[in-house]
Every structure is written in structure tokens, then in C-alpha cells.
Image (spheres, helix red, strand yellow):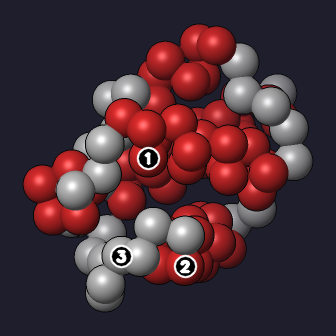
Amino acid sequence: MTRDVLQGKILTILVQDFEFQQPDLDDNLRDVHGFDSIDAIELLGKIERVLGFPLTREEKEKAMEIRTINDILNYLETIQQGRAQ
């Protein structure tokens, strides 16, 4: 999946499921949108559905470093690249 496709899917999830208003790719999810750890867990479940496979424990732990939408996209690209090898 290309970064543009991933971006569209993630933005759709954030707007529809988490009620983000006009999210910017560099917004700090916690500071700007009030995103918390429960939201992060829910988002990881949705990410697994987008990717079509479950994330490993290590991949989920790495996700805790995410702060922005761009971080999410970088994270997803890294996972996809790792799985493609």
C-alpha cells in the first residue's frame, strides 16, 4: 500500500472514528486532539484491519513512540517494508 493510500485510510479513521476536526499531519495527537492510551489501543486494532494482518508485540510496543500522523505513516511504511522482506 502506498503512503498516499495509507494516509487516506488513517485520516478517514481519525475523522470518522475519533472525531478529529481538520487533522494536520504534524499535529501532536495528544496535545491537539486529546488522544490517550485507550485511543492508541483502539487505533492499533483499526491499523491491523487496514494492513490485513495482526501486529506483533514488538510492533505494538514501537507504536507507543508515535506522536503525530506523520509518525503513524512512517510506522506503517516500516512495518510494510519489514513484512515484504
Q: In the image, is 34 to the left or to the right of 70?
A: left
Earlier along the polypeptide chain: callout 1 or callout 2?
Answer: 2
Query: Residue 34's image quarter?
Result: bottom left
How far across and how far down the image is residue 45, in percent? 67, 43
User: Given the current orientation, which residue lies at the most extreme front position?
Assistant: 38
Q: Dot 2 surroundings within 10 Å: few (below 14), some, or many (20 or more)? A: few
Mark 1 and mark 2: Cα distance apart in space: 13 Å
Above or below: residue 34 compared with residue 64: below
Residue 39 is at least partly visible in this image: yes
Earlier along the polypeptide chain: callout 3 or callout 1?
Answer: 3
Question: Which residue is at 46% across, 31% downward?
Answer: 63
Residue 39: give its label. 1
Amino acid identity at mark 2: Gln
Q: Which residue is mark 2?
A: 16
Query: Residue 26's image quarter?
Result: bottom left
User: Given the current orientation, which residue lies at the most extreme bottom position?
Assistant: 22
Question: Which residue is at 36% across, 76% downward?
Answer: 20
Question: Which residue is at 49% across, 18% downward?
Answer: 61
| Front one among 62 and 85 | 62
Q: Which residue is mark 3?
A: 20
How far across and how far down the image is residue 4, in percent? 59, 75
- The C terminus: image quadrant: top right
Disc 1, SS: helix
- The N terminus: image quadrant: bottom right
